[in-house]
Amino acid sequence: MPSMKPVAHLGGQRPPYAAAGFTLIEMVVVLVMMGILALVSAPHLVSLSAATLDSQTKAFASDVRRTQLLASIQGVSLCIQASGTHYSVVQCAQPTVPFIDPATGLAFAGDFQNGVTLTNAAIVPTLAFNSLGAPNHATRFIVSADTSSYLVDIAALTGYVSITVAP
């Protein structure tokens, strides 16, 4: 049976198994540095307002459709008051009194966040849906953030709500 003696290293070289790979400490240091780099550079790569612009536009369009539905179900005229970063639904006969959403029991309103703003492109009276759900006129809302925008159009006779990307 051969004796187990340590192998002499020629010229101070490491054995072959020790030459491959990284130590655990080296790997941890590299991963920490990558994490710090990602943390610092990520906010510059993705704009939070642009990332949420699409979802906030869809939520606003959904609220417009819901306003139309509630007007026809409850048999009242409902108006959408919108400006800047806030919109609310009120009864047209009482514009200072917020309309209470029957599903939540709260005032039917919404806010845009993260730099998203709302503009009513039509220079006409407030958009209103009569008790049959028909709008008083066609209108266009522009929902924008940074350099991108979406158009939310409401058709005159049907109240059809569509979303398109602004050119």
Image: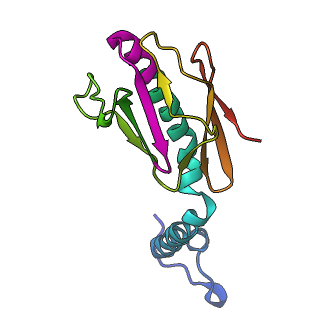
User: On the picture, is 161 further left or further right than 130?
Assistant: right
- Give x and y (percent) for residue 129: 47, 20
Which quarter of the rendering shows the N terminus?
A: bottom left
Vertical arrangement, residue 137 with respect to residue 22, above or below: above
Q: What is the span of residues highlighted in magenta in the rendered image?
A: 67-85
Q: In percent of the image, x 45 and y 75: which residue is there?
A: 25
Q: Which residue lies furthest to the bottom in this view?
A: 11
Q: Which of 81 and 143 is in front in this view?
A: 81
Q: Residue at x 36, y 31 (%)?
A: 90
- The residue furthest left is 105
Q: Where is residue 97 in the image (x, y as percent from the top left)?
A: 28, 35
| Quadrant location, the C terminus | top right
Q: Nearer the viewer, residue 36 or 108?
A: 108
Residue 163 lies in the magenta stretch: no
52 shown above or below 99: below
| Callout count | 0
Q: Up-down: is 13 above or below 119?
A: below
Say which quarter of the image contains residue 155.
Answer: top right
Which sits in the foreground, 147 or 42? 147
Q: Does the magenta stretch include residue 80?
A: yes
| Residue 79: percent from left, percent from top | 43, 29
Observer-nearest residue: 165 or 64? 64
Q: Which residue is drawn at 38% across and 32% down?
A: 89
x, y percent for residue 72: 41, 11
Give the residue displayed 26% in from the left and 22% down from the top: 102
Tell me if 68 is positioned left or right of 98 in this view.
right
Q: What coloring was used for the rendering? A: rainbow
Q: In this view, does 82 lie to the left or right of 106?
A: right
